[in-house]
Amino acid sequence: MTWVTRTARRIGTTARTPARARLWIDIVTFVALVTLFSVGWPTLHITHQVPAAAQPFIAALAVFPLALVRVNPALGWAISAGAALLITLAIPHQPGNDLPFQVVHILVLFVLLFAVAVRAPIQVVLIAWVSSSLLFATTMAGSGDSFAEAGFGWPLAMTGLVGFGLLVRWLVLSRQALVRQEEQNELERARRAILEEKARIARDLHDVVAHHMSMVVVQAQTAPYRVAEVSPAAQAEFEAIGASAREALNEVRSMLGVLRSDGQLPEHAPQPVAADVVAMLDGVRRAGVPIEWTIEGPLSGIPDTAGLALYRIVQESLSNVSRHASGAPVTVTITVSAESVELLVGNEAGSGTPESDSASGGSGIAGMRARAESIGGMLVAGPRSEGGFQVYARLPIGAAIAVPATALPGLSG
């Protein structure tokens, strides 16, 4: 089967044959032409009654169609078969020779018929097979009992040769189809990798950009309460800054929503870890947001996957509680145990007007919940019954856990 595969590769479609393979086919064909011609010309007078001057031309007519085996095997077969019929009808045999044409001519016909079966259209293959069978059946059959002289012997040989050629043809086509399928699979894998990368970037852009834009909005909204003696003009300027920041935040979220998709793969390093939460909280305080935090237990012992989820949930929670109750002090409590890490982010009723998720165009709560559930945890977020907003999350460090929403009684129904 290995030899068949190699043969199929060599005599495949010219357009798909590499230049080096075509060169080797041409070299082998040239060597075969020279060899067969050097045998056919000197021995032609032994088998046929041909004048010496005509012998090279008759030998060339029998051998040279082989030169078309790669370029156009159907045309080469037609010329060779026509020459065989012409030699049979026009040139008498030598006494004692029963072959209507030379053995080298038979070999050339066999090679060309095989090439036709591999490369030519099926209709041409059918015509060549039937014509070759008739040619050999009518010119080769004799009165003897040998296989070569039997009427069915040569047609049966033609059938076997054509069948083998069609088998090689099928192997060539199957291999080409497999190569095309592999190329399509590679393109699909590359496309999927690009989409997954886009989705990962979209998630991180939403987490980072939306967080900082929200901080800009919070700073602009709370500036009149934090800064003494703000003039009406400055207050109007702060309000304009907050409105522009909210509009930009909505547009960013709208554009990033195009890139977001379900079934996204986890992010790849480098990514924030649980220990980076402290630096983030400190940055929020420097931005002017009144915030206090309490951390019980070592953050360094939290695995990377849970640490990344904790970091992103804290980041988005600060944006949500500030947006829903702007101006109110924010408290963050992180409790690390052997089995899980619990997070509670909240504030009391703020002085500003609460902003809903639908008004902001965001998907932060749904994104936080998806992050928590992706590692087997849970998250509940919503307005508190006594005012303000609160986010509670519990993330497993070991086995997955599930906590019902009723475990957070501070949320209003």
Image (cartoon, rainbow, N blue to C red):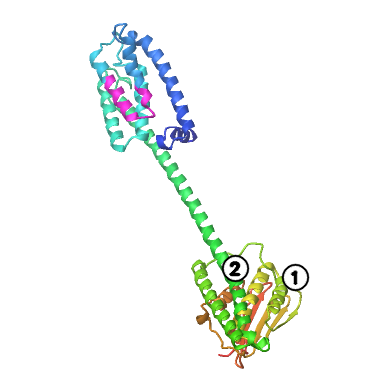
**Magenta stretch secondary structure, dominant:** helix
The amino acid type of the residue labelled 2 equals Asp
Determine which residue is flagged by label 1. 300
Residue for point 36% across, 11% down: 41
In the rendered view, tell whether residue 164 sits above or below residue 381: above
Q: Does the CB distance between marks 2 and 1 fall below 8 Å? A: no
Give the residue displayed 23% in from the left and 14% down from the top.
90
- Residue 8 in the image: x percent, y percent? 44, 35
Indicate yes or no whether the magenta region holds residue 232. Answer: no
Q: Quadrant of residue 64?
A: top left
- Position of residue 114 measured from the top left corner of the image (x, y, whole percent): 37, 30
Residue wearing tag 2: 204
The vertical placement of 255 against 406, above or below, is: above
Q: Quadrant of residue 169?
A: top left
Residue 21 x %, y %: 47, 31
Per the rendered image, the range of residues in magenta is 65-84
- In the rendered structure, find residue 89 and report the number of the disc placed on it: none
Q: Nearer the viewer, mark 2 or mark 1?
A: 2
- Which kind of residue does numbered mark 1 sit on? Ser
Q: Is residue 372 visible in the rendered structure shown here?
A: no
Of residues 175 and 204, which is closer to you in this image?
204
Residue 220 drawn above or below residue 95: below
